[in-house]
Structures are given as C-alpha cells and as structure tokens.
Amino acid sequence: MKVSYNWLAQYVDLSGVTPEELAEKLTRSGIEVEAVEYVNKGVSKVVVGYVAEKEKHPDADKLNVCQVDVGDGERLQIVCGAKNVAAGQKVPVALVGAKLPGDFKIKKAKLRGVESNGMICSAKELGINDKLMPKEIQEGILVLPEDLEVGQPIEPILGLDDVVLELGLTPNRSDCLSMIGVAYEVAAILGRKVKLPDIAVAETGEPIDGKVEVEITAPDHCRRYMARLVSGVKLGPSPIWMQNRLMAAGVRPINNVVDITNYVMLETGQPLHAFDYSKVENGRVVVRLAKPGEGIVTLDDVERTLDEEMLLITDGVKPLGIAGVMGGANSEVTDKTDTILLESAHFAASSIRKTARKLGLRSEASLRFEKEVDPKGVEYALNRAAALMVELAGGQVARGVSDQIIEAPEDKKIVLRLSRLNDLLGTSLSLEDVTSIFERLAFTYKTEGEVITVTVPTRRQDITREVDLIEEVARLYGYDHIPTTMPYGDNTQGLLTREQMLRRTIRQVLNGAGLDEVNTYSFTHPDIAFDFATVYRETKPIPLAMPMSEERSVLRTNLLPHLLETAAYNMNRKQRDLALFELGKVFLTDEETLTKLPEEKLALAGLLTGNWVGPHWQQKAEPVDFYLVKGILDVLFNRLGITGIEYRPAKDLAGMHPGRTAYVVLQGKTAGYLGQVHPVAEQKYDVGETYVFQLDADLLMELATMHQGMMPLPKYPAISRDIAVVVDRNVSAGTLQNIIEETAGEWLESVRIFDVYVDDKLGVNKKSVALSCTYRDPEKTLTDEEVQAVHDKVVRALAEECGAELRG
C-alpha cells in the first residue's frame, strides 16, 4: 500500500512529524514501512506558464518558437519541439537557472539560431511516472488545467511536494489498505484524532424506486449489495489534485467517473464499480453464481470462461461483471454515458480469492475483497462516491438507494482481563494505561473492576480474541517499553532419539565408504513404479488425487527407479563413476481402491556403477562388482552391531540379474537384496553395468545394537591353516564358512575365502573353494598339534555336512 503523506494529512494532524519519523513510528508499532519516497526528484524554479503565441521555427520544421507568460508581466521566448504545444495552453515552464531530475540545469541557449530562455516541460522531464498518464501526454509536454494562476510554483500543483510511504502489510492488516484505515493507525500512534470527510449527498434526482432493483441469489457469497443512480454525468478529466493522489498510490487516472471510484476505494478500502445504466436491462441487478462454461469479456478485453463457484453481477439477462474482480466490457462507462449505476457491496473473501486465483486475474478490488473489507463501509463509500460525482461530474443523485442486506454487520465485544494482559506481557500496566490505548484506537469500552469489555469496530477484522487486544496494547504501549526477562526453568540436555541416531550412523557409514546421498521425489511414474521388487510385501499402485504431472502421479514403492534415473542423468553429463545411496520412505497398500492412508516404510537403497578405483599410471582401473557392494554392506552391518548375516542366491527378483543377485538375510529375516541390475533394465534406464542394494531400514534399526566388539592387542602368535575343498556348485562359500565357525571353537579367530575355482576337471557340477583359517589362544601359544587337531575336526565336519573333499 502506497500512502501519500499530504493525503494522509487530510485525515490526521501530522504537524511536527516528518515522513521519516512517521515511518519509524509505524514500523515500531508493527506496520512496516518498506520505503520513503520523495515525489520531487530534484525539481526547482519551475512555474506555471501561459503560451501566448506559437510560431514555426524559421530554420527547423520540428521546432516551434513560443512566447510564454510566466507571471509578473514577464514574457519569455522558448523554443519547443513538442508536437502538442499550442497557443492558449498553460504549461510547466523551467526558468533559466532551474533544476530538473538528473541534475539537469536550464540555461539560456540558441537553437538553430533562435534564442531560448527556459524550457516547456513534459511529465517525464519533471520526474513524474508518465506511464500512469495517457499516451498523448507521454509523447508531449504536460498541459495543465486552465484555471491555474500563471507564475505559481509547479510543485504543489503536481504534488511534487509530497512524500509516499510504501507499507509492507501483513495479510491480517487489511484495514490499512485504505487511507482512512492508515489514518486511524497513525492517530493511535500519535495520540491524535481522525478527521473524516463530511459527506452530504444531495439527492436532487428522481426517486430510485422502479428504476433499480437489486436481488441476491447467492447469499453465502454476497452479504450486502447497494446501488445508487447518478444521472446527467459529464465525463472528463478529474481534477489535478485527485490525479496526483491516484498517481501517488500507483493508480492511472482515466476519467472523472472511474477516478472517483478508484479514489474512494483507496480512501475507504471499499471497492466500487460504475456501470453504464443504459446497458443494464430494466435496471435490474441480480447477484448470482455463474453457470458452468459461462463467459464474459472483461474490461481488459479478454474473454473469461467461468465456473459454478464464481460470483457474477448480472442484469438477469447477461453478465455485467465478475463480482469483486473486474467489470464487463459490455457495461463499461464511455464518453456517451449519461447515467451511472454505482455499486457498493460486501462479497465473501473466500469467494473472491478463489475466483481471482482461478482466472489469474488480480485487481486492486480483488486484493481488498479477498482480505476482508469493512462490512459497515459499504454505505459510507457509496455515499462518498455519489457526493463526489455531484461535485466533479455534474451528476444528479436519485433519491434513495437500492439495497439488499443478507447479514447485518455487528461490532465484536471482547472481554480483556487486566491480570492476563500483565501476565503475558510481563508489565504492570494500570487500568487507565490500557483504556487510554483503546481510546487512541477509537475503540469503545466498559470496565468492571479489572475486566474491560471492548467493542471492536468492524474495520478491524483482525481482532477476534483477547490475545489480539493484548497485542494491540503491546504494540501501542511500545515493544521497547516492555521489560525484558531472562528465561527460567529446568534445562534438559538435547539428545537424539534412537531412530535419529541410527539414521545418522547409516549416513555416516555410507558416506565414509565413498557413497553420495541423494534425495529423490516420493512421487513416480506408473510405468516404472514396479520395475524392481520391493523389500517389503507385494503392494498395489497408489495414485495421487492431484498429481503435479503424469511423471509424478503415483507414490513410490521402492527407491531403485529414481536412483537409476539419477545415475542416467549424471552419465549423460559425463559422470560415469557413481556411488549413490538414498534413505527415504516408500508407500505400501493392499487395497485396489484406497479407503485409508497407505503404510509408510523406511527403505535404504544404493547404486554403484563404473570404476570404484579410477585408472592410474601405476595401476589399472577396478570396476564395481558384486563383492564390493557386499563388502560395503558388511561394514554397515558391523557398525550397526548386527550379527547373523547370510547372503542367499536370488534368481526371480524383478529387475535384477538372475545369476548375480542375492537376498540379504539378517538373523533369519529377509532384509532386502543386492546384485546387478538386469541387462534389460540397464538398457531401459540407459546405464551401463550397475550394481544396487535395497534394504528394509526399519528392520536394520530393529536389529541394530550399536555394539562393536573390542579386543586387546594379541600377546601370543596366531597359526594359519589353508584348506581347499571340492563341493557341489550349489553349495555356497558362506555355508562352508558357517560350518567352520561353528566347528572350530573359540580358538578360531577368522576364516577368509580367498579363491573359488570352477572346472569340469574337478567333476560334473563341482567347484573348488579355498579358505584360510586363523587360530589363536589369548592365554598361551598354541602348538601345531593342538591346531591340527581342531583343523582335522573342521575337515570332517565339512565332509559330513556338505560332502566336501580335500582337493589333492
């Protein structure tokens, strides 16, 4: 909201308060002033001049030589190149020695041999925003009203002596979207009175009965509609003082009738609209909801298609305007208009907000309606505009008004407890201190002991509860005057929950292993939602009711599709060596049609592709493989303190390679899987050979102990024994490892698989697995005989349980 300092001074005494001081006081009281702008950009020694004569320049076709009276009998010869300069005009004249914006100084000059003593100015040359003016004025000099006195300074005439305060209003302070609303605020801050304009509507026309009939058929959307009839209006430019005030507020002057409606809207906060009465069928106004697909061409000459939630002003036959947003072109006031139907109404804020948003059409009127206007301001604004039309447009106001009211507005009564106020603010304000603030706000009140019943006027829609009144007292008493107190109470140490700690640990381990975390959308495309098996139960598609796009129209059931899309995105930008992971929610349901919210589960997924170690002149590149991914998971499980880890072959998982995929089993529970992406899926996502894992993170957290075994440095040496056994190819190396760990006893420190060899020479469907066993006793040095006895026991167990034969 842009507030003219001079205009504001018409409603409240600003003597002794500079614009900067006023801005500071407003900001301190909760109404932020974002900028203080002086309208005068550096204009001095510019006066009203009268063009007495105009002749063509003898040596230039585009120049004119003008004789201009500038007061006190002084006549100046000025050469002017404007097309619209003419004898008999009153114009702004910059005298010799004058200054114009941009530090431009006027001097005597000769133009094509003809002396020029000054300059006839355009609006732009005076620093006025000419974009708010008609095109003909933008392209020429500024022509002033004929009734101005020659020689008087131009600054007060064009409002160049004004200052504009730009307010940054919060949505709740819609009362300050009007000059009178700001005046009440300033009066409360300064402790002064508000002076409202005197309104006396001279009803000299015929009775309105039978000429205008108002009907509201959408009472939930329109609470009151009033109309006046003004006949005999003569369209023309509005007075310059009104134009100055409109332009200071950023509104372009158009003609006296439209300018009056805009002026009153800015003054009172109540939007108005003027219809050409001759275009209203039978003088009937029907306020109704639009029909689906109904159309109207608005004042900006754009055809709008409406729906059944949008409120229309009609004449019972055709739409005349979109209520509270913009009028229709078919009822626009033109130069031929003689009689005005003047509208003032109270529309529901939610209705106007929805309409403006759907149509993408925001106006000064809709801005105010959607933030709630004063319901009691409807009649006041209507009468104010009618009185101005009599004064400035020569109109005659019909006797009476056409009015339909659905809901009579009432002032709110709110009870305020003085003890509650002082408890919240930490003050010791007296009853007189508080009631004096309500008097400054122009709120009436009654007291009973220390309880104050405050009547809040309807212009303050933001005050609905006791705490709102306490806030008013606080800001007007002054936040700087409220005593500061140190916080007190028992302090507790902030700690992470177990889940937060485990999530952080998972991220730290994977980051430390060289993986980068990514965060992808929870929404995905239905075509890829089931490309990979979920680590949970089978689930149904979960469509979104209002998707942002087709690509994001269902909830994800696993994390791998988006990880692969991320990998493809990076590969297309020459980043081919990737190690990524994501810890995020997936969504599951067993229902074909949702009747309840889907179940949310926490999943962990990772992706590795390209080289794990890049090529170097001293070593060759090491590509990612299955065992690298398995090793990373082993590190993670170890850090989480999870034991009982198994990897079992998986040949039937969607999207995964049937020969290079394994289930991850933790303490007998399937926690997920790891392996290579199926070549078909790799081709679909446009990636190379890629390995992934996907785990049930909720299960990881359930099994995690965060216990890491600690052991002292060994005092006694270890003895190693290597063993190579031939077994069936379907016997996993992990099975052999488990047998050895169960059989060898407490002396076994570690068992490591260091070779797997497959060849038909070993036998049909046979393979050789080589393992290295390390034995150590923490209390003594083991002998070869003791170790050999245990080792022989291991060999027998391997032979008995899986038919292993020592390789010769």
Image (spheres, rainbow, N blue to C red):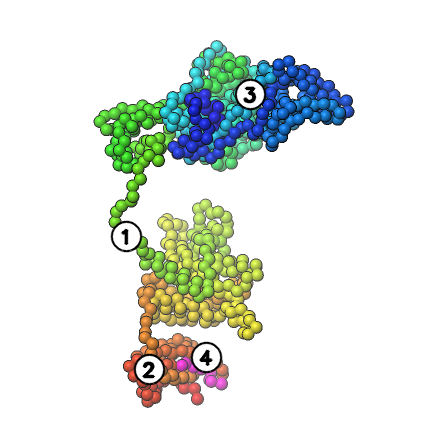
Q: Residue at x 54, y 65 (%)?
A: 688
Q: Which mark is residue 140?
A: none
Indicate which label's residue lies in the foreground, 3 or 4: 3
At a point 29% along the width and 54% down the height, the residue shown is 493
| Residue 586 pos. (x, y %) | 41, 56
For residue 492, which numbered disc appears in the image? 1
Mark in front: 1 vs 3? 3
**Helix, strand or loop under label 1:** loop
The crowding category of the residue bearing disc 2, from other C-alpha atoms within 10 Å (few below 14, some 14 to 19, many at least 20), is few
- Nearer mark to the viewer, of 2 and 4: 2
Image check: 474 left or right of 339?
A: left
From where the camera sits, is residue 800 visible? no
Which circle's residue, 3 or 4, is located before the other in the chain?
3
Residue tagged 3: 157
Q: Earlier in the sequence, mark 1 or mark 3?
A: 3
In the rendered image, residue 771 lying in the magenta stretch gets the answer yes
